[in-house]
Image (spheres, rainbow, N blue to C red):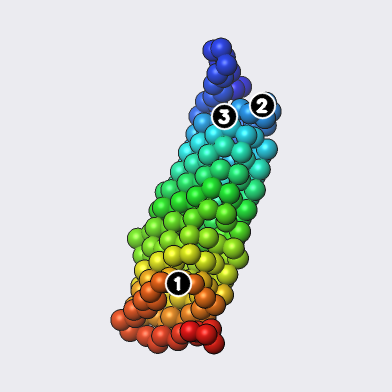
Amino acid sequence: RPDLQVNGNEATLKTANIDRGSVDLTVQVPVNTSVAMRAGRGNVAVNGLNGTIGVDAGHGNVTLNKIGGASTARMSGGDFSAHALTSTLAVSGRTEDANISDVTGKVTLDGDFLGEVDVAKLSGPLSFHSSRTTFEVDHLIGDLTLDNDDLTLNNAKGHIQAATRSKNITLSRIAGPLDIETSDGDIKVNLTGGDGPINLRNRNGAIELGLPADH
């Protein structure tokens, strides 16, 4: 049985550890409620809230959908997805697959991403950091996919910076400036415009650069 404690405008809901069994909770709250949640095991889904959301997930999937406030998630395993967020998003820790789209504020991904990362349609900047790959994108109009072998970015503008190793980098419909570096992989860039320097560095692999006719 969950334990509910109410103190003014704040409420705390807890469940005890269960060795032989499980607890499923569905909690309905006012739309402007802010939520801080810690889940040892199991999936977490938060939908349709305008407050700030903080999730600390032990082992399970996390889904955020239609959130109006700043959102943070700390993962220890499992998949992560977030869609239709109108503020910032920060994800850290250890994640399997990640799928993120339609976020208005800055998106920060910092940790170990063991599966595939798919990001699309961001109004604000994207910052990604793992033990193997770092990249920054000012404005992701299209989509980005990252896995163990490839980093693919389609339709973006503003400053783009990427540094990785043992990974191919493919950029298409890009408006620079660019600062791209890899090793033991290929770099392919299709530049459609933009101002500023184009720096492409590869320690062991090919570099292919396509430029607009007026460059």
Residue at horizontal 56%, vertical 23%? Answer: 13
Q: Marks 3/1: CA distance?
A: 42 Å
Pinpoint residue 17: horizontal percent, then vertical percent. 50, 29
Nearer the observer: mark 2 or 1; the answer is: 1
Provide the secondary structure element on which disc 3 rests. loop
**Can you tell which quarter of the image residue 142 is in?**
bottom right
Q: How many marks?
A: 3
What secondary structure is found at the residue carrying circle 1?
Answer: strand
Q: Earlier in the sequence, mark 2 or mark 1?
A: 2
Asked whether 86 or 212 is in front, the reply is 212
Give the side of residue 119 with respect to residue 133, left or right.
Answer: right
What label sits on residue 124 in the rendered view? none
Cβ atoms under marks 3 and 1 closer than 8 Å: no
Q: What is the x, y in percent for residue 105? A: 54, 47
State the residue at coordinates (56%, 19%). Answer: 11
Q: Indicate which disc residue 34 carries.
A: 3
Tell me: 168 left or right of 203: right
In the image, what residue type sits under mark 3? Ser
Q: Amino acid at mark 2?
A: Val
State the residue position of label 1. Answer: 195
Q: Residue at x 52, y 75 (%)?
A: 193
Of residues 58 and 168, which is closer to you in this image?
A: 168
Q: Judging from the image, what secondary structure is the residue with disc 2 in?
A: loop
- Circle 2 sits on which residue? 29
Please tell me which residue is depicted at 45% across the width and 75% down the height of the picture: 169
Q: Say whether marks 2 and 3 touch (CB < 8 Å).
A: no
| Relative height, residue 149 to residue 89 (above, below) | below
Residue 13 shows in this picture:
yes
Q: Earlier in the sequence, mark 3 or mark 1?
A: 3
Residue 149 at what x, y percent from top left?
46, 74
